[in-house]
Image (cartoon, rainbow, N blue to C red):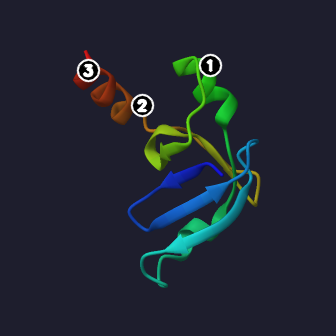
């Protein structure tokens, strides 16, 4: 099962990006509960593949109230520069 890593915990997702479960590092980190689905299609369009482990900053996601949160593009630029 793919996993999304954040500073608040690890989020287990299915192959379509839907949240299956969350392992919190700290029970007061309730903001992860707002996330409904991660945008794996956009990630694949950007990088050309899907992965088994993701950084939350590298993924866009939908919250339960239909809000879409974009990936952190500054993070992507930094990571891509370090890979070159």
- Between disc 3 and disc 1, whose residue precedes? 1
| Tag of residue 73 | 2
Q: CA distance from mark 2 to mark 1?
A: 14 Å
Residue 61: percent from left, percent from top: 63, 46
Residue in view at x 58 percent, y 61 percent: 11
Q: Is residue 48 left or right of residue 13?
A: left
Q: Is residue 34 left or right of residue 26?
A: right
Residue in view at x 33 percent, y 22 percent: 80
| Tag of residue 81 | 3
* Viewer-closest of 59 and 47: 47
- Between disc 2 and disc 3, whose residue precedes? 2
Dot 1, crowdedness within 10 Å: few (<14), some or many (≥20)? few
Which mark is nearer the camera, 2 or 1?
Answer: 1
Q: Quadrant of residue 81 in the image? A: top left
Q: Which residue is mark 1?
A: 45
Residue in view at x 57 percent, y 66 percent: 32
Seen in the picture, residue 84 relative to 68 is either above or below; the reply is: above
- Tell me the SS state at disc 3: helix
Q: CA distance from mark 2 to mark 3?
A: 12 Å
């Amino acid at each position: 099962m793919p996993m999304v890593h954040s500073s608040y915990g690890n989020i287990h997702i299915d192959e379509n990006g839907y949240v299956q479960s969350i392992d919190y590092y700290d029970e007061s980190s309730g903001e992860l509960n707002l996330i409904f689905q991660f945008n794996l299609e956009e990630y694949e369009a950007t990088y050309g593949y899907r992965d088994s482990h993701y950084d939350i900053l590298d993924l866009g996601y939908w919250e339960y109230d239909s809000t879409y949160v974009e990936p952190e593009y500054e993070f992507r630029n930094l990571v891509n520069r370090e890979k070159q």
